[in-house]
Amino acid sequence: MFSPYHRFSNCRKLENIVNALNTQGEISQEVFRAFNRYHFALIYKLKCAKSQVDNLDSLLSAAPPQEILSDSSDFIFKVNMSLDGFFYFSGSALDILAREVLSYFALPLPTNVYFEKARSIVSVNRPGDPILNRLDNPSWKSDFSMYRNALTHELIIARQFNINVCMNGSTQRQTLILPLPDDPRVDPDDRTFRKYPDVTDYCKSHMRRLLKFINIIYGDIYTRTVSNSELPL
């Protein structure tokens, strides 16, 4: 489903056990409705995020740089469109994950639920629950959120790109590389581009770690559900 980024194998395991419990009458209908509502919405967002990464990779590797440079404004428009989509769908998947996790515990959902909110709700209602360790903000989330928030207000890929030349014997291949600014909140003229010199590499890496992160949580929920033989947990 998400090749080549991650096997995401715990997703299918979780779906199978939830459907089996529903057949056996061992899951509350409130939890089952929430599962159908949030789980598959999350999968949709992940598929959309993957599509945007693939689009970005294709944009930067398919067309010869000379053709792109002849109409750079259209090229930058398409790059920013894919990048906006990637950050939107990836962030949305995390927020939906919060709703999905809370639903397995049959905890009430406030009107606005973002990823960080899930941990605080569980800690109040189920202090000491093992899932709390999984709901800590991962180390990569700070940079991701910085870019996602900046993209709601402006473009972060605007003026700077590089041409990468790869020689293989007598064959030469050129590709364009666009960097992410170290801090997109500063004035464009003052931006530096050292931390993430290749936006495609960043997005591919983030796709892998996002899938890994969600897959681990799904694995924990699956294992506990199998042990309990019922939902909610």
Image: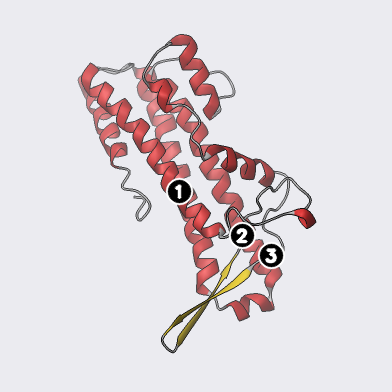
Nearer to me, 219 or 194: 194
- Image: 152 above or below 164: above
Nearer to me, 201 or 149: 201
Tell me, for residue 179, which label it has, or none: 2
- Image: 219 above or below 46: above
- Image: 128 above or below 12: above
Under circle 3, the secondary element is: loop
Label 3, label 2: how many angstroms apart (C-alpha)?
7 Å
Which residue is painted at 54% across and 50% down in the image? Answer: 86
- Tell me which numbered mark, 2 or 1, is placed earlier along the sequence: 2
Instruction: Measuring from the top left, give residue 95's x and y in whole percent.
Output: 52, 32
Q: Nearer the viewer, mark 3 or mark 1?
A: 3
Whether label 3 touches label 2, CB < 8 Å = yes
Please name the amino acid that badge 3 sits on. Answer: Gln
- Packing grade of label 1 (10 A; few <14, some 14-19, many >=20) is many
- Packing grade of label 3 (10 A; few <14, some 14-19, many >=20) is few
Under circle 2, the secondary element is: loop
Which residue is painted at 35% across and 23% down in the image? Answer: 32
Under circle 1, the secondary element is: helix
Please name the amino acid that badge 2 sits on. Answer: Pro
Whether label 3 touches label 1, CB < 8 Å = no
Label 2, label 1: how many angstroms apart (C-alpha)?
17 Å
Instruction: Measuring from the top left, give residue 55's x and y in whole percent.
Output: 51, 61
Residue corresponding to mark 1 = 207
- Packing grade of label 2 (10 A; few <14, some 14-19, many >=20) is many
Q: Residue furthest bottom?
A: 170
Please name the amino acid that badge 1 sits on. Answer: Met
Tell me, for residue 160, which label it has, or none: 3
Q: Residue furthest front?
A: 194
- Tell me which numbered mark, 3 or 2, is placed earlier along the sequence: 3
